[in-house]
Image: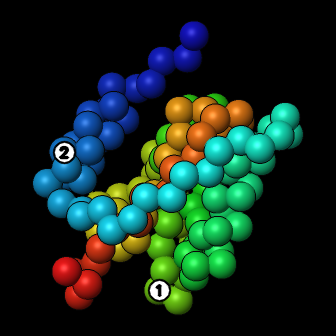
């Protein structure tokens, strides 16, 4: 079993604490349910929806089911994996893609209000 170095864990908890201090207000939630036995079909549908609605989609880490960042495609080009997102990038995110099982489960897109939309 590979162990995560203590300094990495401490950094992740520090960032999580900073994330929680930065409040995000949910604007909308979209649900994508599996429609077939094709793995990752719901995820593909969610990504298609995000692109059609002007979002850039971050890199997934499917083995851990970490959230995937969403941001206005005109503002941010690339979005890091969840484990590499820093506080500055978190502030700029416009939403998240969430799931307990990206392969075969329900996928949720959570859109956030931005400061100028409240």
Observer-nearest of 42 and 16: 42
Q: Where is residue 102 in the image (x, y as percent from the top left)?
A: 64, 39
| Quadrant location, the N terminus | top right
Residue 29 visible here: yes
> The residue tagged with tag 1: helix, strand or loop?
loop
Left or right: residue 26 compared with residue 48:
left
**Residue assigned mark 2:** 17
Left or right: residue 115 compared with residue 93:
left
Q: Which residue lies furthest to the left in this view?
A: 21
Q: Where is residue 100 in the image (x, y as percent from the top left)?
A: 53, 33
In the rendered image of this protein, does residue 10 appear above or below residue 29?
A: above
> The residue tagged with tag 2: helix, strand or loop?
helix
Residue at (53, 89) in percent of width and height: 74
Left or right: residue 80 compared with residue 13:
right
Q: Where is residue 80 in the image (x, y as percent from the top left)?
A: 52, 60
Observer-nearest of 89 and 5: 89
Q: Position of residue 29 (x, y in %)?
A: 43, 58
Residue at (84, 34) in percent of width and height: 37
**Residue assigned mark 1:** 75
């Amino acid at each position: 079993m590979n162990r995560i170095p203590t300094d990495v864990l401490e950094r992740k908890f520090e960032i999580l604490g900073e994330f929680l201090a930065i409040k995000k207000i949910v604007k909308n939630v979209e649900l994508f349910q599996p429609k077939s036995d094709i793995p990752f079909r719901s995820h593909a549908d969610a990504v298609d929806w995000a692109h059609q609605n002007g979002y850039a989609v971050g890199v997934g880490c499917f083995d851990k089911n970490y959230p995937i960042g969403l941001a206005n495609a005109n503002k941010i080009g690339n979005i890091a994996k969840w484990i590499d997102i820093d506080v500055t990038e978190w502030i700029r995110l416009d939403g998240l893609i969430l799931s307990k099982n990206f392969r075969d489960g329900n996928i949720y897109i959570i859109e956030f209000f931005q400061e100028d939309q409240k």
